[in-house]
Image: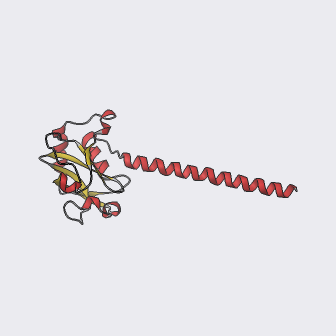
Amino acid sequence: MAPTLDVEKLRLGDLIEISRPMYQHWAVYVGNGYVVHLAPPCEGAGVGSGSVMSVVADVALVKKEFLWAVAGDNVWKVNNGLDQEHSPRQGFVIANEAMGWVGRTVPYSVVSSNCEHFANNLRYGKNVSRQVTSATNMAIGVGAAGLVIAGVLALARGLRRENRNTE
């Protein structure tokens, strides 16, 4: 169950990270218990950001919804983790800009224009997604490990052939 919303602890422009089963969904706190976030336009309130449609959609709708409606039963937390790397804009500026996006349909891509990119762009003016960076780094690591293993196997096969030819 998601934590009880304590509006007193949330500040305008805070980034809210919602733990979904396979990924993290991101929203921006705009006051009075509301967040602004990206969700597939084909689904109703509170469900769009948690469905498979958010992965395959090529557009998203910017929505303003109650935090607990977006989070549902998922755990959420404030995560302004990039504050050490990038200067955050003032909270009221972030919230006002976020509200200006509400109702718009925007291009969406899991890799380059997802909900985390949107939230970080509002807070820092930076199009950043740590999830994408982590997934990319992991894929590169797995790919590199696969190449090393393939190279070792090819070398071993070559040595075996060479040994057979010298016998």
Name the spot of residue 89 as percent of width and height, x first. 23, 36
Name the spot of residue 112 as percent of width and height, x first. 36, 52
Name the spot of residue 44 as percent of width and height, x first. 20, 64
Q: Which image quadrant for residue 163?
A: bottom right
Q: Nearer the viewer, residue 71 or 84?
A: 71
Q: Name the residue at 31% across, 39% down.
A: 81
- Above or below, 51 against 8 in this view is below
From the image, which quarter does the C terminus lie in?
bottom right
Q: Which image quadrant for residue 82?
A: top left
Q: Nearer the viewer, residue 57 or 141?
A: 141
Judged left or right of residue 97, residue 115 is: right
Judged left or right of residue 137, residue 8 is: left
Q: Nearer the viewer, residue 114 or 105?
A: 114
Q: Nearer the viewer, residue 93 or 116?
A: 116
Q: Name the residue at 72% across, 53% down.
A: 156
- Above or below, 53 against 17 in this view is below
Judged left or right of residue 130, residue 150 is: right
Colour scheme of the rendered structure = secondary structure
Name the spot of residue 55 as percent of width and height, x first. 34, 60
